[in-house]
Amino acid sequence: MNDLQQHDNWDDEKVEIVDLPEQGESKAADHKSIGLLQHQLRIPTLIWAVRIGIVLLVGLLVLTILLQTPFFSSPRNSSRPASKPAPLTVTGMSVLNGFVYVNASDGSIAAYRSNDGKRLWRVNLGARIYYAITSDQTVYCFLIKGDYGQVAALRASDGTLLWTHQDTFTGVVWLMAKDGIVYLNTERGMIYALRSSDGRLLWHFLAGMPMQFSGFMSVNNGIVAIQTYENELYLLRERDGAVIYHYASLLTLQDVAFPYVDKGFIAIISNTGSVQVRNEKNGSLVWQYTSAKKAAPWLPTVLDGIAYVNNAAGSIQALRIQNGSQLWQFKPGAAISLPVLDNRTIYMTTAGGTVVALRSADGTLLWHTQFASSVVNETSYPTVDGGTIYLNLNQPGGNVLALSAGDGHVLWQRALSTHAFAHAPLVSNGIIYLGTDDLTIDAWRGSDGQFLWHYRAPTQIIWYPTVVDGIMYVLPYNGTLDVLRLSDGKLLWQFAAQK
């Protein structure tokens, strides 16, 4: 517009110049026509210039956009780090037949050879694996997919997907596989039983809410035993989920032990020291035993078809599970520890410091070894592994005793640690291992009590480590997996968290 106004003023000046005497009017008209023609010619030129300007602006805008792309950007811009993916961590593991199956945070599960970590296969299931177990050459995984839960069954040898089952499983779910059935316990108190061959739903049972998520259920000889936080005990028939027996009381969760099922009978033990034996088919009471007051500090226990009970006089009785008749009785004359059965032999300790071995069939005394009463306490029940009996393992700060299971002679006596145990020691494959805190594992040789090795994790350890076939699998909370040789603590391989 400014240019146009300047041209208009210039034309007005021209008109004043040609406004001469009359004899020049014809020439002035010619000049005016030429001025108008020039003015008209300037308008298309201006439009053309505007168009060129618009094109240049658009080109400049396109160039600016291109310069922001990685291809055209400067080396300085291209060096910017890309957003990092979430670290890949271990969320669970299980061991079967020399292989460890690791489920990771990206929804994958992979099979690794236990001794060297070589990967056999890997499958990404597309959702976070909440829980995975192995049984009968199959890996069962529970995945959470939105409002639904899904069970996936994979062949352990090659990871082939065998079947999936999806339902309204929500929240915390616990898996167990036994006798060709996969069991799921949900936080709503519903038990699901799926056929392991194809995932077909066999039955489901509502046991009430809330329920205990681990250790609440056992399956033995075709009977499913369920105990709830509401102090109810259910016995179900495994094949169809039918209720055999339902028990409710004012007792707490710890007051009823999980039933023992054997030879058509079900033994139920309570913390009062009583034993109820019921018929497996219909739940009818066959016999019961009530312990005397002030009995020794352990509950009755059932081992190999025999119920072992104790009384205030310090005697132990072996009762036949079929009818409650006494098979034998042993009177050591002092309070006794919980009996431990190994290789058809019962091992016990007494308050007087005696270690006793009895033949389980008839109660015959095989041998006994006497210590000072302060050395062995009846609360320290024996641990038997590989022909060796370990005493005082559950007494931090005390001396551990190792005896020959064959004749009771002392193999060695040693204080394994001067520190209090954060976790009770365990014995596996002739190695004693324990944790004095949540970061370390110490190992001793069971044959002579010699210190073997020390392991320290980068972060806290999920106790207890898994030990299978001489290999220890340690899961620190940072999402890694350390695989150690139990004999010397050597790190065989590691699944490290990937960033």
Image (cartoon, grey):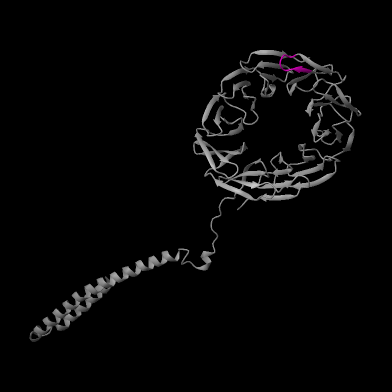
Q: Is residue 128 left or right of residue 8?
A: right
Quarter occupied by residue 4? bottom left
Image height check: is 64 above or below 160?
below
> Residue 326: x percent and y percent?
78, 14
Q: Nearer the viewer, residue 304 or 449?
A: 304
The residue most toward the left is 23
Residue 311 visible in the current orientation: no
Image height check: is 77 above or below 499?
below
> Residue 130: x percent and y percent?
58, 39
Residue 160 visible in the current orientation: yes
Please give the name of the residue rendered at 87% of the width and 20% of the height, measured from the top-left corner: 332
Q: Name the quarter where the N terminus is drawn.
A: bottom left
Quarter occupied by residue 420? top right
Q: Is residue 35 left or right of residue 282?
A: left
Q: Nearer the viewer, residue 115 or 69?
A: 115
Q: Nearer the viewer, residue 340 or 2?
A: 340
Please give the name of the residue rendered at 67% of the width and 24% of the height, measured from the top-left corner: 258
Please give the name of the residue rendered at 53% of the width and 26% of the height, measured from the top-left corner: 203
Please give the name of the residue rendered at 63% of the width and 16% of the height, measured from the top-left corner: 283
Image height check: is 245 above or below 451?
above
Q: Which region of the structure is painted magenta?
A: 318-324
Is 394 magenta? The answer is: no
> Residue 89: x percent and y percent?
61, 47
> Residue 212: x percent and y percent?
62, 28
The residue most toward the bottom is 23
Q: How many marks?
A: 0
